[in-house]
Amino acid sequence: MDLAFSGWSGILILVVYGLIMLGVGIFTYLRNKNIHNSLDEYYLGGRGLGVMVLFFTFFATQYSGNTVVGYPPSAYRQGFEYLVSVPFFIMIIMGYLLFAPRLYKMGKKYKLVTPAQWFEKRYKSKAITILASLLMLYGLGNYLLEQLVAIGQGVSGLTGGTIPYQIGVIFFVAIMIIYGWLGGMRSVAYTDTIQGIALLVGVFMLLIGSIIYFGGLPTSADYMQAYSPEKLGIPDGPGVRNWLSLLVMIGIGAAVYPHAIQRIFSAKSEKTLKRSFSRMAWMPFLTAGVVFVIGIIGISAFPGLSTGESEQLVGKMASAIASQHIIFYWSMILLFGGVIAAIVSTADSILLTFSSIISNDLYGGYINPNASQHKKLLVGKLVGVVVVGILILVAWFPPGTLYEIFVLKFELLIQISPGLILGLYWNWLRRTAVFAGMLAGTLVASFMTLFGASLLGIPSGLWGLLLNTMICIVGSMVMNASAVEEDEAKQVIGM
Amino acid sequence: MSQPKKEPIKNGKIWVVFGVLIALITPWYFPESFGEMLVYGVPLWAIFIIAASLLLSAFLSYVIKYHWMLEEEEEEHEQEGVN
């Protein structure tokens, strides 16, 4: 992001933004002082989030800074083929319909705080709960690392290097940890609301500015017709396959993100959850759609950028628009504040879920089950801070040769979905089959990704998921011996 | 009057419609010429994809509202009891 002109005004916006977030943390802390003695209160906001807050926390968690900064360059390079980014966000809501209604009911019935707890309740198997927790912790840690790097780059880009990368990371991570620590899920959800609004306003101003100063879609289409007609064309065979793979993988994968699942448990009521999802079903047009159009307009506004240069597209467009008018100058600075806000809002949700799995599933479940809720919470928070510290060190000195390992996140995260979703409905599902499937899927997805193996152009995570699901289903049908297990399952998921 | 409990996953018809909509939001069925015709700078095939995506969102909203009813009534009764 290259917005060098905005040095001190950028710093001002970031400091004001940081102070507002801190204020939200202090406010929620003062209003809910008993929050630090109950996992329910701290991690799920007392299961009382209303429609608007729940909607914005889903929204800000799902759309990270990458949607705004990273998607327009993809649209710039691929043209209309990247329109897939709109329906794939809608598919996530369809993914939720596979399990959210039942999971909300189970969450309420068994007072679940984390997704891993559902595995424990359903399968009563240490092996499954620990494997699922580790997959989630790994995926979440990876995500968090990405967000930390993005915060650093965003801050130094916005202030034209006045605030160096490292200071940016430390400043925002400190603020995020403080407000998260003070108010838990409530702080995170309220700040998500402010962050979501900042992002929406900024993105729309960028769109309006792009249309006014760069001529909008018709100008861009004229340019493409003359110089790169393939960007207007219909995707070819491999393009269509890639399109469909994305729809399926993101539809299922993003819906089972542990931090998204935790929001299902946080809903005040079924009605609230339904309304939030219903609104979310329309958001892709206002977010992914708008940033897609911005990327397409960029094709004629800044023609001929190399892949590396095109990554800076949003910064270049914002700079050009900001220099046209004072209103756009400030709205572009707000946009970049909004981008940082979006990154922080994704990071804080991940951190909260990460800590909850430590507090509840690993420490509270296996290490010290008799600990008080206060102690469990404290351990989760402290481990969270330590992990963030380690991740900052990793972000500081990126280990080049280990890079491939950090690429794995989606591939591993989605391996929890057969156990999570099938287990909600199917009494016959056997715990041995679930464990074997999860392990096999994880191994296949990891090996394929690490060794760069590819088959039919379908992502390695989906191959792992396919194998995983088959082992779950076929394995359970073959092992029909345990009537006890089936009875247990009936009791847990019986309606 | 109490409404029967419903959840989307148990209704096969809903998933047939979702199947059709997924087929419609994937660009496999367009003739070559749809990439050359433009409407306000947007190729015709992309207009179809956007329209199908809008249909998917609309259908999702419909399913969420009318075919998902597990706890709502009980929760409303609970609330009435509290108030």
Image: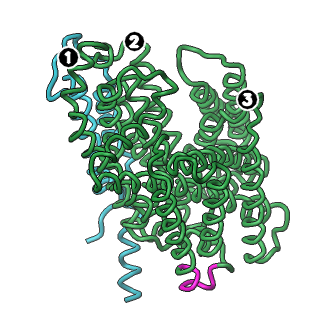
Residue type highlighted by circle 3: Leu
A456 horizontally vs B2: left or right = right
Q: Are marks 3 and 2 on the same chain?
A: yes
Secondary structure state at the residue bearing disc 1: helix
Residue under label 1, please give it: B34
Q: Residues within 10 Å of mark 3 (few under 14, many from 20)?
A: some
Residue under label 2, please give it: A237
Q: Residues within 10 Å of mark 1 (few under 14, many from 20)?
A: some
Q: Do labels 1 and 3 share a chain?
A: no
A127 horizontally vs A407: left or right = right
Of labels 3 and 2, the one closer to you: 2
Using the numbered discs, state the Cα–Cα distance from disc 1 to disc 2 in whole angstroms: 16 Å
| Main secondary structure of the magenta stretch | helix
Q: How crowded is mark 2: few (under 14 residues within 10 Å), some or many (20 or more)?
A: few
Image spot of residue A313 (x, y percent): 42, 34
Which residue occupies 48% across, 45% down? A4
Residue under label 3, please give it: A443
The residue nearer to you, when weighing B3 against A23, is A23
Depicted A16 relative to depicted A103: above or below = below
Whether residue A412 is visible: yes
Residue type highlighted by circle 2: Gly
Q: Give the range drawn in magenta.
A: A28-35
* Chain with green colouring: A
Secondary structure state at the residue bearing disc 2: helix
Please give the label number shown on residue B22: none
Which chain contains the residue that carries disc 1?
A: B
Which chain contains the residue that carries disc 3?
A: A
